[in-house]
Image (tube, helix red, strand yellow):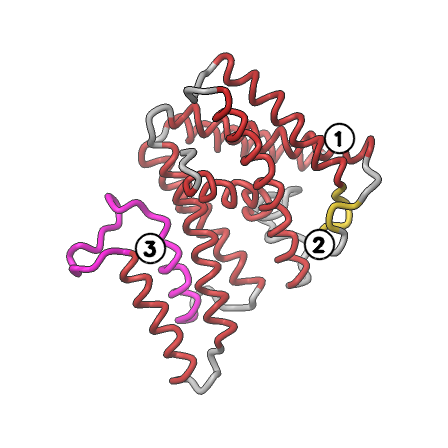
Amino acid sequence: MKQRIITAVIAGAGFLSLIIIGSWPFTLLMVALATIAMSELLKMKQINYFSPIGLLSFFLMWLLLVPEAIMSTDWLHINKFEMFLLLIILLLALTVITKNSFTFDEAGFVILSSVYIGFGFHFFIYTRFLDQGLELIFFILILVWATDSGAYFAGRSFGKHKLWPEISPKKTIEGAIGGIILAFTVGVIYTLFIPLFVSFVTTVIFIIVVSITGQLGDLVESALKRYYSVKDSGQVLPGHGGILDRFDSLIYVMPILYLLNLI
């Protein structure tokens, strides 16, 4: 527990400081975190980081992650998403060229992992540089943390009905509801002091979307770890596991907020 608290204080202070600073230090942090998260996924799949497929996985993820202003492909007369599509086609062709020593399953893993990590952290960067981006990022973080805390304490106090025992045996329906209630309470208080949306209805929708999809993002990573029979995604954060263990909710929430036009 002592190690867990020390890690949380040091890592949390550094993380929040770089969010406040913004600019290139924040962007570099996101690139570093996304790269570590991608390496954790590759390790689960037992793909060597420095193998051709491992390096291509990182490159695909960076294509989606890094803003156009920093990593432009204009000089190739092709945009990043066209290049991403071209590389997917080449990956699929590789399953034939290698006579299935590189399989369709591995190709699918590489593609889906790069989208999962790349877009998740990309929209974290995107949100930080919006008008009121700092306030919005902190709002999202507070909602995710409130959801986690509310779910934990409500689950311990009132939890009787399992939410999804095949994926995460300890999570309960009562805990999930408790997480949403605490997120709603904290979120409304936050927006009383820092208004972010024109209407209260939008605020409520935003809070509910973040709280529910944040919990779903946590379950997605739980399903992934259960499938690959690992307890934690990594050991980069002593007492807390890996980067994916800490950012699973956030990188799932961010693209959904973008798709719903909430950021």
Seen at 50% across and 71% down, the residue is: 106
**N-term mark: 3 or 1:** 3
Instruction: Confirm or deny contact between disc 2 and disc 1 (CB under 8 A).
Output: no
Q: CA distance from mark 2 to mark 3?
A: 31 Å
**N-term mark: 2 or 1:** 1
Q: Indicate the position of residue 26 as horizontal and vertical percent values.
A: 38, 35
Q: Quadrant of the C terminus?
A: top left
The type of residue carrying mark 3 is Leu
Q: CA distance from mark 2 to mark 1?
A: 20 Å
The outermost residue toward the bottom is: 99
Query: Can you tell which of label 2 and label 3 is closer to the viewer?
Result: 2
Rendered view: 228 above or below 207: below
Q: Main secondary structure of the magenta part?
A: helix
**Residue interval drawn in magenta:** 51-80
Q: Which mark is residue 167?
A: 2
Q: Indicate the position of residue 56 as horizontal and vertical percent values.
A: 38, 65
Instruction: Confirm or deny contact between disc 2 and disc 3 (CB under 8 A).
Output: no
The type of residue carrying mark 1 is Phe
Q: Which mark is residue 153?
A: 1
Seen at 42% across and 51% down, the residue is: 118
Q: Check disc 2: other Cα within 10 Å, few if <14, some if 14-19, many if 20+.
A: some
Instruction: Confirm or deny contact between disc 3 and disc 1 (CB under 8 A).
Output: no
Q: 200 and 211: which one is in front?
A: 200
Helix, strand or loop at mark 2:
loop
Seen at 50% across and 44% down, the residue is: 251
To which residue does mark 3 refer?
Answer: 63
Q: Indicate the position of residue 182 as horizontal and vertical percent values.
A: 66, 25
